[in-house]
Image: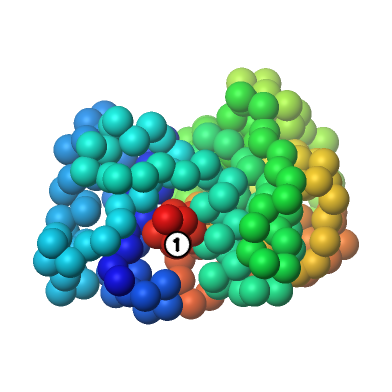
Amino acid sequence: MISVGIDVGSKYTKVIVIKDDKEILGKSIDETGFDVKAKTTEMFKSTLKQAGINEKEVGNVTVTAIRKELVPFANREVPKVVAIAKGAYFISPNVRTVIDAGAEEVVAVKVAEDGKFTDYAVSEKCAAGSGAFIDAMVNALGEPYEKFGELALEGTQDIPINDQCVIFAESEVVGLVSSNVPLSNISRAIHVALADRISSIAKKIGIEEEVMIIGGLANDVGLITFMEKNLNVKVNVPSEIKPQLVTAIGAALSY
């Protein structure tokens, strides 16, 4: 059976096509934009084409992170925490704690031995604990996003920075730049603050190994390094598929 999973994030939409709950035939990531219906329809069609699948062959289309009415061709919607757990379990059946660090929020999910979620915690409605925090800092510094995490690993000085509010943190960063603090130390301070914020959310459900991080921030090596120090465990990042796609995988498996 062919199943499609669609994860509509505030910044990016992800689509996965899976055959018989085992084989990933197609995958795509693109900016969500303002017209969710048009974007998901376009990505649905293009990902099926990539997979060599006809729409009539699709058995289920499951959407997560947004209401089904906004994706009219979907026949099912599933809570994001369910999709996170199923997707992470698909990648590694040994996973017990999943941290989904996305553009606008962080979700920590506890996963049972059968792949079902048993507990979860979600960040407050504040960008300080999400990808938007890094985006704001990168914009303030004018530093390429791709190098920002690596830059943090070069830092040698611990500088306290506000991890509760993007506005205050950005103001502090500007002040550090004006004081000629090396960018590596500024990046380190930002990543330490973000790692502390995300780790505190994960600790609410209790950290149990194996720990996996997914979502866009999973690509940030600086964040992973400081989270491992904070949590005192290895934080695994999916290597065989982009970490942003894991929740869409879980949606495809949720029918």
Reply above or below: 241 against 188: below
Count the marks: how many?
1
Figure quadrant of the N terminus? bottom left
Element under disc 1: loop
The vertical placement of 238 against 105, above or below, is below
* In-front residue for pair 211/192: 211
Q: Is residue 227 left or right of residue 39?
A: right
Residue that carries the numbered disc 1 in the rendered image: 253
- Please name the residue shown 28% across and 68% down the image: 2
Question: In which quadrant is the C terminus drawn?
Answer: bottom left
Left or right: 184, with 105 as reference point:
right
Question: Picture quarter containing residue 121?
Answer: top right
Task: Give the quarter of the image for residue 27.
Answer: bottom left
Is 148 on the left-hand or right-hand side of 196?
Answer: left
Residue 31 in view in this figure: no
Measured as percent of width and height from the top left, residue 87 is found at 53, 62
